[in-house]
Image (cartoon, rainbow, N blue to C red):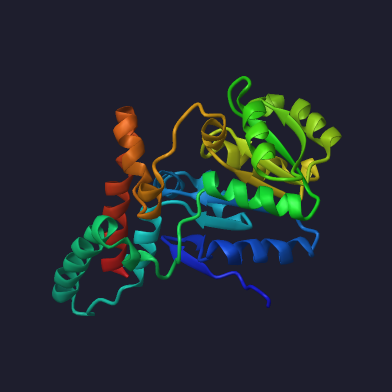
């Protein structure tokens, strides 16, 4: 069965409405076109950055797939889909009530937010799906980025847990444009099919935008701090927190210094609310 791409418009940015299984089938059929597939995983911080940075905004408009990586992105899609009265006064009143109710759902009833986007797909989870896809289809992966020895440890973890997975190369490097020629030479010699890049958001995505076609890889995806999780340098939230969409809260508890980054959520909420009232 053919899977069509369904994009949800969030303040001008296209976010894909995929369940994970459908996303793999969509990628599989896209590979038949012989065009490189550039994947991003968009959380609230990433989304808010794009709304304030033209370069990042344009990059997300031109990527192949933008997964919703975070309950805040699912919330934005849900709230923008709600119907409000046309009368200006009642539109504001009803809009505020629905805003409050939908925000409460983030903690008390996250299932309510899983439409129009059915689920959150994070880089830390999707790296496993792509690795299994690679092993099944005899494709090779390449790990780019991370601190010293981290990509090696991450690759070992993937190969240990995914039978028949082929790793064609590993390199730290940097997202600095002056290093790109050397990095591209290394990747071209390794001839990978899938490229995992961990330079942090949005540096890794901007790197892929500039260079994916030059690498010869079929698929490129930015996966943030995933190598650190795989290497055991940082601990992911318990599965319960991930299932209900509160992984961000767990990370904030463990790393209070992330508070200033999490401030993107209330800023995005206010921006989405004003946009909804005006449109």
**Residue toward you, 271 or 64:** 64
Residue found 70% across the figure and 25% down from its top: 179
Residue found 72% across the figure and 45% down from its top: 163
Q: Quadrant of the N terminus?
A: bottom right
Q: Residue furthest right?
A: 189
Residue found 31% across the figure and 47% down from its top: 265
State the count of labels.
0
Q: Quadrant of the C terminus?
A: bottom left
Q: Residue furthest top?
A: 148
Up the image or down, 117 lies above or below 149; here it is below
Residue 273 x %, y %:
27, 61
**Residue toward you, 150 or 10:** 150
**Residue toward you, 154 or 212:** 154
Q: Residue 125: in sight, yes or no?
A: yes
Residue found 68% across the figure and 61% down from its top: 27
Compared across the picture, whether 259 is left or right of 153 comes to left
Residue 264 x %, y %:
33, 43
Residue 140 x %, y %:
78, 44
Up the image or down, 116 lies above or below 183; here it is below
Up the image or down, 27 lies above or below 49; here it is below
Q: Residue 175: in sight, yes or no?
A: no
**Residue toward you, 27 or 47:** 27
């Amino acid at each position: 069965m053919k899977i069509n791409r369904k994009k949800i418009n969030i303040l001008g940015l296209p976010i894909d409405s995929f369940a994970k299984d459908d996303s793999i089938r969509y990628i599989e059929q896209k590979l038949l076109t012989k065009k490189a597939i550039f994947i991003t995983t968009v959380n609230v911080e990433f989304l808010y950055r794009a709304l304030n940075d033209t370069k990042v905004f344009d990059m997300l408009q031109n990527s192949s797939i933008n997964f919703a990586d975070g309950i805040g992105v699912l919330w934005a899609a849900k709230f923008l889909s709600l119907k409000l009265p046309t009368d200006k006064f009642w539109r504001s009143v009803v809009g505020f009530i629905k805003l409050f109710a939908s925000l409460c759902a983030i903690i008390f009833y996250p299932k309510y937010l899983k439409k129009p986007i059915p689920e959150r797909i994070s880089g830390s989870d999707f790296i496993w799906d792509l690795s299994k896809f690679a092993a099944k289809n005899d494709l090779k992966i390449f790990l780019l980025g991370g601190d010293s020895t981290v990509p090696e440890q991450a690759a070992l973890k993937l190969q240990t847990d995914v039978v028949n997975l082929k790793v064609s190369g590993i390199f730290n490097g940097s997202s600095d444009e002056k290093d790109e020629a050397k990095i591209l030479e290394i990747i071209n010699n390794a001839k990978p099919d899938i490229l995992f890049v961990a330079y942090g958001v949005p540096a890794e995505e901007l790197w892929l935008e500039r260079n994916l076609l030059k690498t010869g890889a079929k698929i490129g995806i930015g996966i943030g701090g995933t190598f650190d999780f795989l290497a055991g340098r940082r601990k992911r939230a318990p599965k319960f927190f991930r299932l209900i969409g509160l992984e961000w809260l767990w990370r904030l508890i463990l790393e209070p210094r992330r508070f200033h980054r999490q401030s993107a959520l209330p800023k995005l909420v206010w921006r989405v609310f004003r946009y909804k009232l005006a449109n």
